[in-house]
Amino acid sequence: MRRFTWVVALVMVCLSLVVSGCGKKDAGSVVKELDGVMSKLQSYHGKGQMTLRTGQDPQEYDVEVSFQAPSFYRISLTNAKKDITQIVLRNDDGVFVLTPHLNKSFRFQSDWPENQGQVYLYQSLVQSILMDNERHFTSDEKAYVFDVVANYQNGSLARQKVWLDKRNYAPQHVEVSDANSNVMVIVKFDQFEFGTKFEKDQFDMQRNMTGWNLKTLPTMMQGDSKAGEKSGTTDSKAGTGAASGKGTAVGNGTGTGTNGTATGQGAGSDAKGEAAGTNKGNAAGAGTATGDSKGAATPGTSDSSKTSSASGNQGTAAEAGSDKGAAANGAQATAAGAKKDTSKQQSFGIIEPRYMPSGVKKQDVTELKLGEEQAVMLRYSGKYNYTLVESRPQVQTVSILPGDILDLGFTLGVVTGDAKKTLTWTYDGIEFRLSTGDLPATEMIKVAQAVQGEIGK
């Protein structure tokens, strides 16, 4: 009897060991299964937040990533506070870096992102795990955690920790650290799914330029633009009024209707599509109200000393700015015959990077013009020599250039040139061009990152 009891106890111990062993995976088995996931990967879609600690204050960005085999990518980076989005696409036509709110695009023939890792791409995260034979492996209740070597363009990023969901190996969390173990980049995925079915134009350049912020599309219908009916009343004391008529909301400009005299300024500042002015009498007719990409044409007030008048039957809409009357970055559209004031739209403070390479000093600051645009140029000399040109572009530009993409963390820059290289990027509506013949790529990244969070002087 005693012998039988020992046998039963031994069998129970073995069973418990087998059960516990089945529920726990080691690094080797996880890596093997990850390799299998990669070989069968067809598509995925993820959303999350990225926090950068490369500047004085942490900067937060909304991240959205899409992939469709064999090589279609879409990455959207949105500044959470400023609501400014940059999009990177790869499709059959090449690689595109799009800045929709500036109507700006660059196109390349490049094998990106195969030639460089991106912290928010699943392929980059898994490859860093598969390639590091000295990887560190742990697990918690819901995730497998790998600590591996980071392989990014920014040489100051040394290691990264990756949390993968135990159920399907989807990424949950990523932390990238420098050589001193300071966490510099954090990516937290709120959602991530494999096998996503995308719309046909998900990776189309034109669709992403015109419909980049899907939240704004419904507002194009404000004022019941389907029926084209707009109504308004006049209060001469308050100085407010709205034109009544049938029309659409497209572009920036002003509209006047028949049977009345409308005086005032056109679309208001900040590209919100506000039509401000004073309406003397009820204006009813086939006028056309115009607005920005949000398409919201609303009544407002105006300083009569700054308005011009347009009267008569069948009033017309004066187009201002660029691209069918769209005045970007707060440019004002005035009524017919009025002179456009561009002083405010080109006014911005000089942003000086808080970082300079060792042995470099600022030489001077020069004001200049780039076509019709005001700009400033900062020159630096010493161990390395480079210039930094800052401008606020008002018109669309489409460039097809030989070059490559440089990951700056908070945005993606464009590098062109051979002997003399120029790094171009945008931040807070300002376009930066860093040109040099001897500044290393790692130092270019540091200088570019040093404008992040700075305020113009």
Image: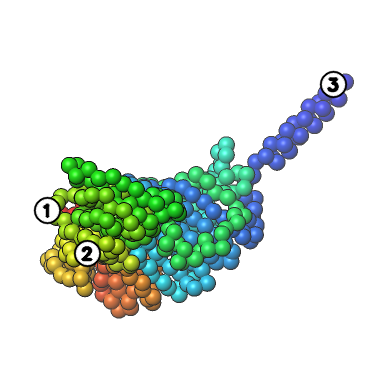
Q: What element carries label 1?
A: helix
Give x and y (percent) for residue 54.
32, 51
Q: Residue at x 34, y 48 (%)?
A: 231
Residue receiving disc 3: 2
Q: Residue at coordinates 16% horizontally, 59% vertically from top-left?
A: 308
Q: Which of marks 3 and 2 is in front?
A: 2
Q: For residue 305, which numbered disc appears in the image?
A: 1
- How crowded pointer 3 is (Cα within 10 Å; few <14, some 14-19, many 20+) is rated as few
10 Å neighbourhood of mark 2: few (<14), some, or many (≥20)?
many
Identify the residue under disc 2. 336
Q: Which of marks 3 and 2 is nearer the N terminus?
A: 3
Circle 1: residue type? Ser
Please state the horizontal and vertical placement of residue 314, each as a whole percent of the image: 29, 62
The secondary element bearing badge 2 is classed as loop
Label 3 sits on what residue type?
A: Arg
Residues under labels 3 and 2: Cα distance?
106 Å
Distance between the alpha carbons at the discs numbered 1 and 3: 107 Å
